[in-house]
Each structure stands twice: as C-alpha cells, then as structure tokens.
Amino acid sequence: GLLGCGAINSKVAEMIVKKEAGPAELVAVLVRKERTHNELQELLPPECRTEATVVTANADDFFSMSSNWSLCVEAAGQPAVRLYGKRCLEIGRDLMITSIGS
C-alpha cells in the first residue's frame, strides 16, 4: 500500500508496475483529499491505473483486512505518520517511512 501519491510515491508506483521494485504489486493508495474516482486514478502515472489498484481517501478502506498488501510505503509527511503509522503496525503490516523528518 502507498500512503500518499505525490512525487515520491508516484515514482514508487511506476517502479512497482515496471517490475523495478522486486516482486511487489500495486494494490492500494491512500490519499488525503476525497476526489472523484477519475480524479483519484489520475493521481497515478498512466501505466499504474488499473482496476486492481484501489485509490482512496478513506483510511478504513485502505486498512481493511480485504486490502491485500503487506508493506505500506509512506511518502505523505509527518502528519500522515502520526495518523496512520501506529494503525498500520497494529494490524501486522510493515511500514516504510520515506519522508524526510518523519
């Protein structure tokens, strides 16, 4: 799962889809602001927009047990780490923090 979809995680998503990040799959992306389905999809690079990837502003959807991811790559800043870091770890998922200062 990707926490944030700015410059860093857009590049991470692209690398996952191009198989440049090992055997990873792009499954879910949590963004801060609610948008329409099309607007959410447009946050990702074109090659990353698939029906299999859930892009949402709803944390409950992102962290649901049906959301099939094991590693959360954070690139959304310190507030996102404070809001979601503990929750991620409490449900048994790994958390990689990439934001400087987080």
Image: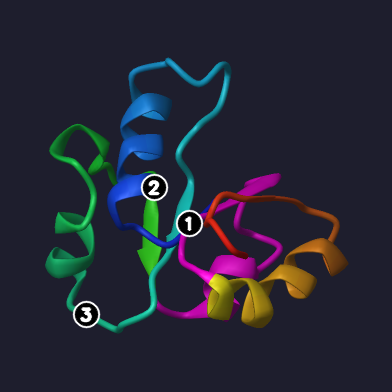
Contact flag, marks 1 and 2 (Cβ < 8 Å): yes
How many residues crowd mark 2 within 10 Å: few (<14), some (14–19), many (20+)? Answer: many
Establish if 36 lies above or below 18: below
The residue at which mark 2 appears reads as 9
**Is-magenta flag for residue 67?**
yes
Magenta stretch bounds: 57-77
Q: What is the three-letter code of the residue carrying label 1?
A: Ala
Left or right: where 94 falls relative to 46: right
Closer to the observer: label 3 or label 2? 2
The residue at which mark 3 appears reads as 35
Establish if 88 lies above or below 18: below
Residue 51 appears at what percent x and percent y? 30, 47
Residue drawn 56% across the image and 16% down it? 22
Q: What is the three-letter code of the residue carrying label 2?
A: Asn
Establish if 20 lies above or below 79: above
Marks 3 and 2, how far apart at CA? 18 Å
Marks 1 and 2, how far apart at CA? 6 Å
**Count of marks overlaid on the render:** 3
Give residue 75's mark.
1
Q: Quick one: label 3 or label 1, which is nearer the N terminus?
A: 3
